Image (cartoon, grey):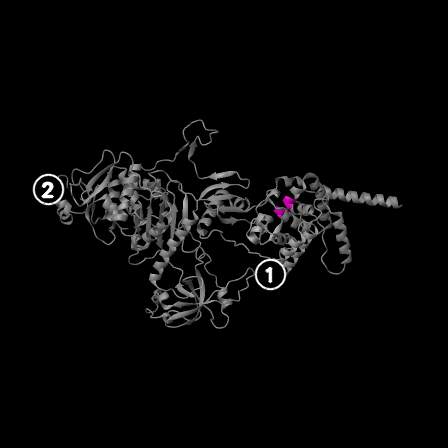
């Protein structure tokens, strides 16, 4: 009877196991294991700029994981891992015994899952606490052990498990908790990470530090017991603090926020969100970190200088300054990407200074630090605030007329770390965007989309559609140079009326003055609107529109005369790209933020560089010529025209609207100012032979910048500050004069050949077959003035008539 009962029971168990095994998932999928992996974005020098992931995970081969890290996890989870066949029968028996002893006590049952069983559960099964699932787990574990090596199973486990703080896998956890690579982990750090899979929330380093420390020390003891660590090393490791330095979720590279977000948007457009957040891409961008810092500082300095001249906007908030003000102040969000500034609360105000309390820090659990640091703002360090920006009060005479106790303000430390002296600051209301680019490749080297990403995520370098104003004029003149005009061509600078559809348009020069007949060079140097309109009218706006679209400024430009003055909306990035074509001698530019993208396996799936290199992959040296990089980009502008426009824009800086604003220590530099109607936007775009940069300033809701709010007055100094820092370590180079171009001295007013000794002489560049005019002729003159009026306004014209020079009219 016993034998029969045994056989019946065995048959029942066999049938049950067969039924359970029938529905088991295919463990062969482990061969194609491709978990969600973090996409990492790097600057041009390799520095980590940003990470994007739904699960923070970096896949790491088992060979790259140090023995001490493996030992920590084996000691914590499965010390017999390399000896059992998938299920640890000894451990299972011990767990059953403990659970029988605890039966009815309310304690949670003790598990005995091996690492192989956890792999089976995590990859192939659910987490249901049922007998069926445990049986399936055991069966799969035996099969997995037969199909894969122990190292492969451990590799799967260490790369898959969850560690808390949205980190998955040992490599991701090392970065999240200690900001280290796995190879840098100490015994104590490895032991703490090994303690987390059992319950990350239970051993949180900030919420439950005592439990975390106790669990870590227990793992260290198991490592000593199992012979992985000596007694002395174990004792030393247990003395160490947890040492968790939780990694920030934001960009790792300072000041790269706007750039990183622009890259993220491009990756989503190109590959989709799933690939970005799970695909494990390795992205190498074109960002130059040092140049980015210089761009950020220059734009911030310009915005703050303008804003402070307008006056004080008032306190950010009011809190109770009596008692412990630290908690209330700590809860106010500060500008995280402007670490030079700190929030502070006004504690007391006098005619001489302001006593302030600085915002205390918070730890990872949100607990406010106990220290209450204080400082002082002297009256001289806040005099700019005596004027109210909104005009709500008369000009104050001391700090007491500006601030009150409880006002929350921004301050910036003056002097060294030990100083307690501060300066009053305020986030500016005016904004702007700046882009710097390599004109030869189109690589964007720096990008700033506003004063602070924490203040506003809107990227004014790529997303803001603004009127470029006079900074568009070089492209009107470039179209003219390509269509028979020369820099010495003379155009009438006088009032003009354009009648269209019954409407009369009367453009004016900035300031309202006119100069009479003037050369194209003079027109661009002094940014003459009336000359530009006449030139565009004579040339034809269809040609101007075609050039604007060819340079990428607009996709479709309306061919109306007002567009010749930059009345259409475009972006800073597009304008800088267009100027790069002029700077590089006429070659087409494809602006890029990304140099190369590799997938999780290291295969390059995108690269910006499209030039071909003949002979670069030669197997050996056989006295062949050096490899030649073939520039197969389209030429969109005659190189001679590019030089003529460059030379004319050098004059903008030497004699024109940016005179006295740009000083790069003798380097060749060209550029153009831009100011829109009612001074709502102030532009400057310029370049050296190796770097192009452009920016605008303006309110997000366009409004007048006020008197002097021009490209030359506001934006050119920002350009100058940035370029001085950006080019200081670059080798000095000159603008290249194309072969065959003729340099001829001319009279800067009449455009005709200059007489010997004429003090009004300038050397002008002419294409072969062209040169100074033999007679003084004026384009567009007859549409505005009678000949006798021309003689009154233009001494040069009058002289030409008196000397009998033909062709005046």
Whether 158 is among the magenta residues is yes
Residue pushed farthest front?
232
Whether 13 is among the magenta residues is no
Q: Where are the magenta residues, as a range?
A: 154-160
* Element class at badge 2: loop
Q: Position of residue 790 (x, y in %)?
A: 15, 47
- Whole-angstrom CA distance, mark 2 to mark 1, is 94 Å
Q: Give the foreground label among 2 and 1.
A: 1
Name the mark on residue 207: 1
Which residue shows up at 58% across the image and 52% down it? 166
- What's the magenta bit mostly, secondary-structure-wise? helix
Residue pushed farthest right?
1
In the shown orientation, is residue 553 left or right of residue 216? Answer: left
- Image quarter in which the C terminus is found: top left
Q: Which residue is mark 2?
A: 803
Foreground pick, 505 / 354: 354
């Amino acid at each position: 009877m016993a034998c029969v009962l045994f056989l019946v029971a065995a048959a029942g168990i066999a049938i049950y196991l067969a039924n359970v095994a029938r529905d088991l998932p295919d463990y062969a999928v482990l061969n194609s294991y491709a978990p969600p992996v973090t996409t990492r974005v790097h600057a041009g020098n390799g520095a980590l700029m940003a990470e994007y992931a739904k699960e923070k995970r970096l896949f790491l081969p088992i060979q790259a994981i140090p023995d001490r890290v493996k030992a920590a996890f084996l000691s914590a989870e499965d010390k017999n891992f390399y000896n059992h066949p998938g299920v640890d029968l000894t451990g299972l028996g011990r767990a059953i015994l403990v659970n029988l002893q605890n039966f009815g006590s309310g304690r949670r049952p003790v598990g005995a899952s091996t690492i192989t069983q956890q792999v089976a559960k995590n990859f192939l099964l659910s987490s249901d606490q049922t007998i069926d699932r445990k049986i399936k787990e055991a069966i799969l574990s035996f099969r997995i052990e037969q199909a894969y090596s122990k190292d492969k199973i451990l590799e799967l486990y260490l790369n898959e498990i969850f560690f808390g703080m949205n980190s998955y896998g040992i490599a991701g956890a090392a970065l999240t908790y200690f900001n280290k690579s796995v190879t840098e982990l100490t015994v104590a750090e490895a032991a703490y990470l090994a303690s987390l899979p059992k319950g990350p929330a239970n051993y949180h380093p900030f919420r439950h530090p005592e439990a975390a420390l106790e669990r870590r020390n227990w793992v260290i003891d198991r490592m000593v017991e199992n012979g992985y660590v000596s007694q002395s090393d174990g004792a030393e490791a247990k003395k160490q603090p947890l040492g968790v330095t939780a990694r920030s979720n934001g960009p790792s590279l300072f000041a790269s926020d706007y750039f990183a977000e622009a890259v993220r948007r491009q990756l989503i457009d190109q590959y989709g969100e799933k690939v970005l957040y799970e695909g494990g891409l390795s992205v190498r961008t074109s960002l130059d970190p040092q140049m980015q810092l210089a761009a950020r500082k220059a734009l911030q300095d310009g915005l703050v200088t303008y804003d402070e001249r307008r006056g004080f906007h008032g306190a950010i908030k009011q809190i109770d300054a009596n008692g412990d003000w630290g908690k209330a102040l700590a809860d106010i969000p500060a500008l995280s990407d402007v670490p030079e500034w700190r929030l502070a609360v006004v504690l007391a105000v006098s005619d001489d200074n302001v006593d302030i309390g600085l915002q205390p820090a918070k730890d990872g659990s949100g607990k406010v630090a106990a220290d209450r640091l204080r400082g002082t703002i002297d009256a001289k360090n806040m005099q700019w605030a005596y004027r109210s920006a909104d005009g709500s009060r008369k000009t104050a005479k001391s700090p007491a007329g500006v601030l009150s106790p409880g006002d929350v303000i921004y301050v910036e430390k003056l002097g060294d770390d030990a100083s307690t002296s501060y300066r009053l600051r305020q986030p500016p209301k005016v904004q702007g965007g700046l882009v710097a680019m390599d004109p030869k490749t189109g690589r964007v080297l720096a990008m700033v989309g506003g004063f602070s990403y924490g203040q506003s995520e809107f990227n004014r370098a790529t997303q803001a559609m603004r009127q470029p104003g006079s900074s568009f004029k070089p492209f009107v003149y470039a179209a003219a140079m390509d269509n028979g005009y020369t820099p010495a061509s003379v155009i009438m600078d006088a009032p003009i009326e354009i009648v269209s559809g019954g409407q009369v348009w009367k453009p004016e020069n900035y300031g309202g003055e006119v100069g009479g007949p003037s050369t194209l060079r003079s027109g661009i140097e002094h940014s003459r609107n009336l000359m530009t309109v006449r030139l565009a009218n004579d040339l034809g706006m269809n040609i101007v529109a075609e050039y604007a679209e060819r340079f990428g400024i607009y996709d479709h430009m309306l061919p109306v005369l007002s567009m010749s003055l930059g009345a259409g909306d475009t972006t800073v990035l597009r304008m800088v790209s267009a100027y790069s074509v002029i700077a590089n001698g006429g070659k087409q530019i494809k602006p890029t933020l990304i140099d190369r993208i590799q997938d999780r396996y290291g295969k390059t799936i995108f690269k910006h560089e499209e030039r071909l290199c003949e002979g670069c992959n030669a197997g050996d040296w056989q006295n062949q010529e050096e490899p030649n990089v073939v520039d197969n980009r389209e030429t969109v502008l005659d190189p001679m025209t590019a030089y003529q426009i460059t030379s004319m824009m050098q004059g903008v800086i030497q004699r024109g609207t940016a005179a006295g604003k740009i000083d790069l220590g003798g380097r060749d530099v060209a550029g153009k100012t831009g100011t829109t109607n009612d001074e709502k936007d102030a532009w400057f775009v310029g370049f050296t032979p190796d770097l192009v940069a452009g920016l605008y300033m303006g309110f997000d809701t366009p409004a007048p910048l006020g008197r002097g709010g021009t490209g030359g007055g506001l934006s050119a100094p920002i350009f100058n500050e940035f370029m001085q820092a950006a080019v200081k370590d670059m080798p000095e180079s000159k603008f290249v004069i194309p072969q065959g171009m003729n340099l001829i001295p001319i009279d800067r007013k009449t455009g005709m050949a200059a007489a010997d000794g004429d003090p009004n002489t300038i050397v002008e560049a002419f294409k072969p077959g062209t040169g100074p005019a033999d007679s003084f002729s004026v384009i567009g003159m007859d549409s505005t003035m009678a000949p006798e009026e021309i003689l009154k306004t233009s001494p040069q014209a009058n002289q030409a008539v008196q000397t009998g020079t033909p062709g005046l009219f």
